[in-house]
Amino acid sequence: MNEKTMKTSFPPNEIQVSLKINDKKHSLTLDSRTSLLDALREHLYLTGTKKGCDHGQCGACTVIMDGKRQLACLTLAATCEGAKVTTIEGLAKNNELHPMQDAFVRHDGFQCGYCTPGQICSAVSLLEEAKNGEASYVTADVRNISEELKLSEEEIRERLSGNICRCGAYNNIVQAFKEVHSGDDEMPTWKSATEEQMRRAKKNYQLPEHQ
């Protein structure tokens, strides 16, 4: 290696990586071992994607890559060239929340909020899985799938089981997903219920009058 080559070479393990994140192109100089999660947080300062276990077990780092769920902590940034990556920051458009984000707010699908970005990215990807008729471990009859799937609550819970919520907001998360997926307008948990939802809730849960 001559002197000129040495001056223009990257240090050991450093590579040039081109990433497309939230429809914006970025050129980064990274250690070849840098995970997508660290590239997002430490180099692009997109801190919405959270680092939880850093071992692919909690789902907090879930992002969307080419329409599919991806664990950013287990994905090398260098392998993402040519892919379209969407993080929680890229879901809202024109200052309007994505329907799934809005449903999480309406149904109180979060408490501390640390797992929420991963939960929402996973839920948005699941919408596409259902739309494409992709089967899962608990799909009742995989031979009869020909079009969009209407997911049961059991399926929703199974398909989102890779995202852990330490606070235990699972029921609310499922209700938020059901609203976006199938139009289920079960009573939200916050003060965003419509008059019709309030009327139905009062009717369904009316206490018996004292004699």
Image (cartoon, rainbow, N blue to C red):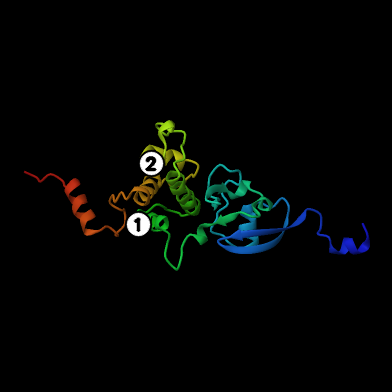
Provide residue 59's location: percent of width, then percent of height. Answer: 53, 46
In x, y percent, where is residue 101? 42, 57
Amino acid at dot 1: Arg
At horizontal 15% and vertical 46% (from top left) the residue drawn is: 207
Crowdedness near tag 1: few (<14), some (14–19) or many (≥20) residues, C-alpha within 10 Å? some
2 left or right, relative to 211: right
* Residue 196 against residue 24 in the figure, above or below: above
Q: Which residue is mark 2?
A: 151
**Based on the displayed image, in which of its 4 quarters is residue 83 positioned?**
bottom right
**Residue where numbered disc 1 is placed:** 106
Q: Is residue 41 visible?
A: no
Q: Amino acid at mark 2?
A: Leu
Q: Does residue 127 sit above or below 86 in this rendering?
A: above
Farthest front residue in view: 146
User: In this image, 131 relative to 33: left or right?
Assistant: left
Mark closest to the chain's N terminus, 2 or 1: 1
